[in-house]
C-alpha cells in the first residue's frame, strides 16, 4: 500500500461492480470537494451516491483533524476503487442446469488534501 498524505476515508464491501463505479470516480478526480459533491448529487449512477458518502466522510475527517481548515480549501487528491470479494450465487436455468451469478463488491478510498498557495 502506498503512503498517502492527506485525510482518508474508506468504505468497504459495497455491492457494486468496480468497473461501473470507476468512470464516476474519474469525473471528480482533482476537483474541489464542494464541486465534486455538486457533480455527484446530479449524477444518476448508483456509484455516485456511494462515492458521495465516502467523500463527505473524508471531508468530515479533515475538518475534525484540523480545526483551521475551510471546506473550500479541500480538493480530491486521490480516489481509488478497488475490487472486493465476490458473492457467488446460483442462477437456475432450463433443463435442470445452473449458472453461477457473481455479485461483485468494491472498496472506495478517497483522499482529500488542502490546496497549496491560497
Image (spheres, rainbow, N blue to C red):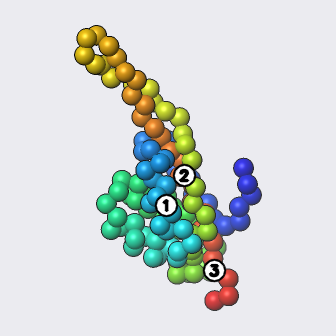
Quadrant assignment for the C terminus: bottom right
Asked if the residue at tag 3 contacts the one at tag 2, i.e. Cβ–Cβ closer than 8 Å, the answer is no
Which tag is nearer the camera, tag 2 or tag 3?
Answer: 2
x%, y% of residue 34?
Answer: 46, 76
Specify the quadrant of the image occupied by residue 73. Answer: bottom right
**With respect to residue 46, does 104 lie above or below?**
above
Q: Residue furthest bottom?
A: 118
Name the residue tied to disc 1: 25
Q: Residue at x 49, y 60 (%)?
A: 25
Q: Residue furthest top?
A: 96
Name the residue tied to disc 2: 81
Q: CA distance from mark 1 to mark 3?
A: 20 Å
Asked if the residue at tag 2 contacts the one at tag 1, i.e. Cβ–Cβ closer than 8 Å, the answer is yes
Q: Earlier in the sequence, mark 2 or mark 3?
A: 2
- Tell which of 99 and 10 is nearer to you: 99
Q: Secondary structure at mark 3?
A: loop
Q: Residue at x 53, y 34 (%)?
A: 85
Q: Residue at x 41, y 54 (%)?
A: 47
Name the residue tied to disc 3: 115
Specify the quadrant of the image occupied by residue 40. Answer: bottom left
Which tag is nearer the camera, tag 1 or tag 3?
Answer: 1
Amino acid at each position: 500500500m502506498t503512503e498517502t498524505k492527506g485525510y482518508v476515508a474508506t468504505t468497504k464491501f459495497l455491492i457494486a461492480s468496480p468497473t461501473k463505479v470507476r468512470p464516476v470516480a474519474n469525473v471528480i478526480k482533482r476537483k474541489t470537494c464542494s464541486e465534486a459533491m455538486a457533480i455527484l448529487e446530479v449524477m444518476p449512477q448508483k456509484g455516485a451516491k456511494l462515492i458521495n458518502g465516502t467523500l463527505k466522510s473524508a471531508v468530515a475527517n479533515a475538518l475534525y483533524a484540523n480545526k483551521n481548515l475551510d471546506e473550500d480549501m479541500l480538493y480530491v487528491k486521490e480516489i481509488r476503487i478497488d475490487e472486493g470479494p465476490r458473492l457467488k450465487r446460483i442462477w437456475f436455468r432450463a433443463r435442470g442446469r445452473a449458472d453461477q451469478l457473481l455479485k461483485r463488491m468494491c472498496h472506495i478510498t478517497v483522499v482529500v488534501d488542502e490546496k497549496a498557495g491560497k
